[in-house]
Image (cartoon, helix red, strand yellow):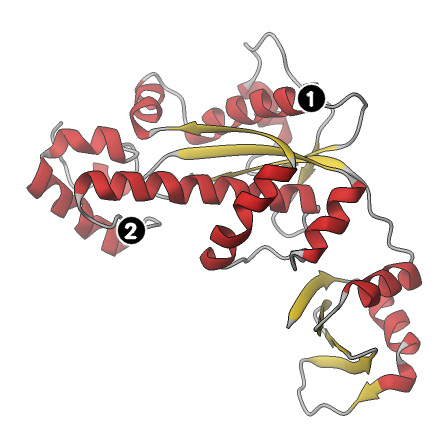
Amino acid sequence: MKHYTMNLSESQLNQLKNGYSSFIKASDSEAVFFIAEHNQTTITALKNGKVTIEGIEINNELVLIKNFLNIKDYEAVGSSDAGSLDVFGPVVICSTYVSLEDIAFLETLDIGIQRTISMKKIVEIAPIIAKRLTHSIVILKPFKYNELSKNGFNMNKIKSLLNNHMIIKTTAKIDKTIPVILEQYCNPNNYFNYLKEEKLVYRDIEFSEKSETPHISVLVSSIIAKYAYLVEMHRLSKKLNLKLKLGATKDVDEQILEVVNTHGSKVLIEVAKCNFKNITKQNIEF
């Protein structure tokens, strides 16, 4: 069973409901705007704008909906990151070019415009995506991150420098001018201020806010970055003979002490971001 998720406006929801008026099925859920069955696919539209298409084959129905609502796909370069909210592991930045042909291909992998994708799904599809799509990626390992942090670089400045480099690298691989979209993590003015000492700065950027539906180029960049992050976390876990935890939770606080007690405090410089509060609040001496 395949599925695809998209987010629509209120007017688009009403338009879609009218289009499926002859195929609507009853639903008792207060969250559901309508459910329709058409061409052996189920279309579930929620009042919050989320629409899911499910079926054995869904591409024809997806094309039908896009054409009906006059939704135009467009190619773009998207940039996103992974690891910046995790104590352990690297910071990964990926910038990816997605053509119109790539969008059609990605939809066959059941990639919808949704922010939450399971780790299992990421591990399954990231190598396939990375092999096909033009992209640039950088993995900033903890040792280098800690070195930059000591020199006064905060996380947003580090991410801005790396995003700029990856966007320049990716756009250089394309022989035409297309939109560039960056998943926003700081004010655009601050972003360019972080780059004021750089000789080359890519400035024609659209900043995509977290609350917005991301372009698929941003989504696939996130997938590739997360996969690279997970691969590096697996390597570090093997090095310590301990499965390192994701995030920056209390469980991570406890694991930090476990790592220090087993391997000494200096190993944190090689496996963790040492300026995170999870580490600094524990007064660990390096």
Q: Is residue 76 above or below residue 200?
A: below
Q: Position of 269 compared to 63: left or right?
A: left
Check disc 2 and report its element: helix, strand or loop: loop
Q: Position of 166 compared to 55: left or right?
A: left
Check disc 1 and report its element: helix, strand or loop: loop
Q: Which residue is mark 1?
A: 173
Which residue is at a point 61% across and 44% down the rendered structure image?
220
Q: Position of 188 compared to 10: left or right?
A: left
The answer, for residue 23, to whether it is visible in the render is yes
Which residue is at a point 45% across and 56% down the rendered structure image?
119
Quadrant of residue 250 within the rendered picture = bottom left
Q: How many marks?
A: 2
> Which residue occupies the foreground of this view, 141 or 252?
141
**Label 2 Cα neighbours within 10 Å, binned few <14 / some 14-19 / many ≥20:** some
Quadrant of residue 275 within the rendered picture = top left
The x and y percentages for residue 224 are 53, 41
**Label 1 Cα neighbours within 10 Å, binned few <14 / some 14-19 / many ≥20:** few
Which residue is at a point 18% across and 41% down the rendered structure image?
240
> Which residue occupies the foreground of this view, 272 or 242?
242
* Label placed on residue 245: 2
**Which quadrant of the figure contains the N terminus?**
bottom right
Whichever of labels 2 and 1 marks the residue nearer the N terminus, that label is 1
* Label placed on residue 85: none
The answer, for residue 184, to whether it is visible in the render is no
Which one is in front in this view, the residue at disc 2 or the one at disc 1?
1
Q: CA distance from mark 2 to mark 1?
A: 36 Å
> Which residue occupies the foreground of this view, 154 or 264?
264
Instruction: Report the amino acid beneath label 2.
Output: Lys
